[in-house]
């Protein structure tokens, strides 16, 4: 069941503010691209609207409850379709946001979590907590801020 979730959270679990990411972390975006390139990416309609353009080299799949929703560069999908494709052996990445991470976490096999070493005041969207009884930390690497990063960050991989 290769359904992977990928997100970046601050030290208090904040992931978003005013419909956008609350930081600029170039190194994290590079890691995000390297992991997701060539795969389908699944996102909520609000995260889709936060993107400047469809993510290139990836099938952009959008979850919405509006059956008439359409937009250029993306396909509407359903939770059932996402689960069916992952159960058939395809690797898909769920890329946000808060509502969709919480919805899909029970079906996920791995989580790629970046901890951004800051605490955003007024974050309005949060990541779900990873229950230590269900999830184990497989790898963790702290990387100092590089050019284009506002903060240090730790790249983690969690498996169920
Ligand atoms: N730090 C990170 O890694 C990261 C990653 C991604 C996003 N973000 C941030 O997260 C925020 C957006 O997150 P969010 O929680 O507000 O919204 P979201 O999870 O991106 O999208 C929520 C939308 O998903 C649709 N939806 C919800 N349940 C559904 C279901 N059961 N079936 C089908 N569609 C369903 C609904 O769309 P309709 O209203 O159209 O029905 C809902 O409004 C932004 O600030 C963004 O920048 C952060």
Image (cartoon, rainbow, N blue to C red):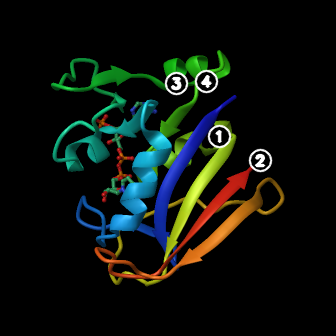
**Towards the viewer: 45 or 5:** 5
Tell me the residue at 67%/41% (across/down). Answer: 106
Ranked by sequence position, the earlier of labels 4 and 2 is 4
Residue sitting at the far front = 147
At mark 1, the secondary structure is: loop
The residue at which mark 3 appears reads as 82
Tell me the residue at 66%/20% (across/down). Answer: 87
At mark 4, the secondary structure is: helix
Compute the Cα span from label 1 to label 2: 8 Å
The residue at which mark 2 appears reads as 160
Q: Are marks 1 and 2 in contact (CB under 8 Å)?
A: yes
Left or right relative to 59: residue 74: left
Compute the Cα span from label 3 to label 2: 18 Å
Residue 64 rendering spot, x and y as whole percentages? 33, 31
At mark 3, the secondary structure is: helix
The residue at which mark 4 appears reads as 86
**Towards the viewer: 71 or 103:** 71
The residue at which mark 1 appears reads as 108
Residue 114 rendering spot, x and y as whole percentages? 52, 65
Ranked by sequence position, the earlier of labels 1 and 4 is 4
Mark 4 within 8 Å of ligand 1, using the beta carbon:
no
Left or right relative to 72: residue 33: right
Mark 1 within 8 Å of ligand 1, using the beta carbon:
no
How packed mark 2 is, by other alpha carbons closer than 10 Å (few <14, some 14-19, many 20 or more), is some
Q: Are marks 3 and 1 in contact (CB under 8 Å)?
A: no
């Amino acid at each position: 069941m290769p359904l992977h979730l990928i997100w970046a959270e601050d030290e208090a679990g904040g992931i978003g503010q005013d419909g956008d990411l609350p930081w600029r972390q170039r190194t994290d975006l590079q890691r995000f691209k390297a992991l997701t390139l060539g795969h389908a990416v699944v996102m909520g309609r609000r995260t889709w609207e936060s993107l400047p353009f469809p993510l290139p080299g990836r099938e952009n799949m959008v979850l919405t409850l509006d059956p008439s929703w359409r937009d250029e560069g993306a396909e509407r999908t359903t939770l059932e379709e996402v689960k069916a494709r992952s159960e058939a052996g395809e690797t898909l990445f769920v890329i946000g946001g808060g509502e969709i991470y919480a919805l899909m976490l029970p079906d996920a096999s791995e989580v790629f979590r970046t901890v951004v070493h800051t605490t955003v005041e007024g974050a309005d969207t949060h990541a779900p907590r990873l229950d230590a009884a269900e999830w184990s930390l497989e790898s963790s690497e702290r990387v100092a801020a590089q050019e284009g990063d506002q903060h240090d960050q730790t790249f983690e991989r969690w498996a169920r």
